[in-house]
Image (cartoon, rainbow, N blue to C red):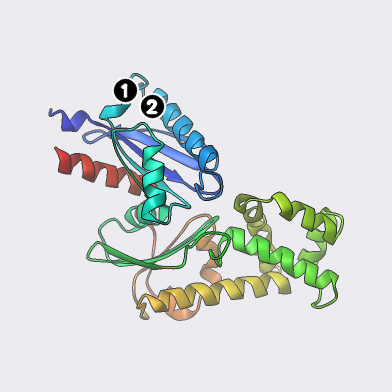
Amino acid sequence: MTKMDQTVLIAVDGGGTGCRAAVGTVQGGIIAEARGGPSNVSTNFEGSVTNITETITQALHTADLGGTDLSQTVAHIGVAGANTEEEMRQVEAALPYGRCRATGDRATTVAGVLGSDDGYVLALGTGTIIARQHAQEMTHVGGWGFQLSDQASGAWLGRVLLTRILLAEDRLVNHSPLSRAVCARYGNGNGLVIFSNSAKPSDYAKFAPEIFGAADDGDQIALALLDEGRQYVESGLNALGFRSGDSLCLSGGVGPRYAPYLSAPYLQNLHEPQGNALQGAFSLARRVAVAGG
């Protein structure tokens, strides 16, 4: 057994709702996993770094690797909000791991969902990832973060729901059972505004299951929101070159819920994801360890 085979690998899948970490070795694969708090570095950088390191520490202890020399580890940290090279380098500099590579969560998601296969990925959770992989090269659209982008995501659905409720309160659009129920929960429109003053993307995303449930019951506001989301993701896939019959994977907490609302051409060759973003991050860390010897 070589030294490389025993190198401790660290992988992180960090998003606006929570953080997952996995640790293991090149030879043994993933040994243990752990879960922690939100880690969108554009929303709260210091808090995200703390959640990442604490979650990794928990995973190391679970794997009986608590005494590992962190400077000798290989890590791939995939986090939401790291959209530029500068932001990725900032994340790397804030962490104590040896060969540490930080990327946005797009790279780890595609690596986990598709492996080395060609295809398209629609990964919707708190945020939005629309990507294509061809010959292990990735292209993408959108995913610029909650403030200006992430259409169709759970957070986007929640925020737009609240804006529609305020329009209904002003009698500019009709209320629906969903909008009345949510508005009553917060007292009135002022209650929604107070909520929004401190709400994070993960807070808005908590409305997503309720929106899908209401759509199943025919709620007109919920159906309108999902149709807007559908139009956006289909346009994104088209911009990447999608053609009827191409392979498409739906992933994330929200992505598969869109399947009943997608147009027929996007449903002809749906594939189950090969893995998840955490497994993708681990495979990317393993590539670095193997390449480095």
Q: Callout 1: helix, strand or loop?
A: loop
Q: Amino acid at mark 2?
A: Leu
Asked if residue 285 lies left or right of residue 277, the reply is left
Give the numbered dot on residue 76: none
The crowd level at tag 1 (other Cα within 10 Å; few <14, some 14-19, many 20+) is few
Residue 173 position in % (x across, y down):
79, 77
Viewer can see residue 276:
no
For image coordinates 54% across by 77% down, the residue present is 231
Tell how many labels: 2
Residue 254 position in % (x across, y down):
54, 59
The crowd level at tag 2 (other Cα within 10 Å; few <14, some 14-19, many 20+) is many
For image coordinates 57% across by 71% down, the residue present is 229
Residue 141 position in % (x across, y down):
42, 69
For image coordinates 72% across by 72% down, the residue present is 221
Asked if residue 194 lies left or right of residue 155, the reply is right
Location of the C terminus by quadrant is top left
Q: Which residue is mark 1?
A: 68
Q: Which residue is mark 2?
A: 60
In contact (CB < 8 Å): disc 1 and disc 2: yes
Foreground of the two, 41 or 249: 41
- The quadrant holding residue 268 is bottom left
- The quadrant holding residue 97 is top left
Viewer can see residue 80:
yes
- The quadrant holding residue 171 is bottom right
Q: Amino acid at mark 1?
A: Thr
Q: Callout 2: helix, strand or loop?
A: helix
Foreground of the two, 71 or 20: 71
Q: Earlier in the sequence, mark 1 or mark 2?
A: 2
Rendered position, 280 above or below 128: above
Asked if residue 88 lies left or right of residue 171, the reply is left
For image coordinates 42% across by 52% down, the residue present is 105
Rendered position, 22 above or below 117: above
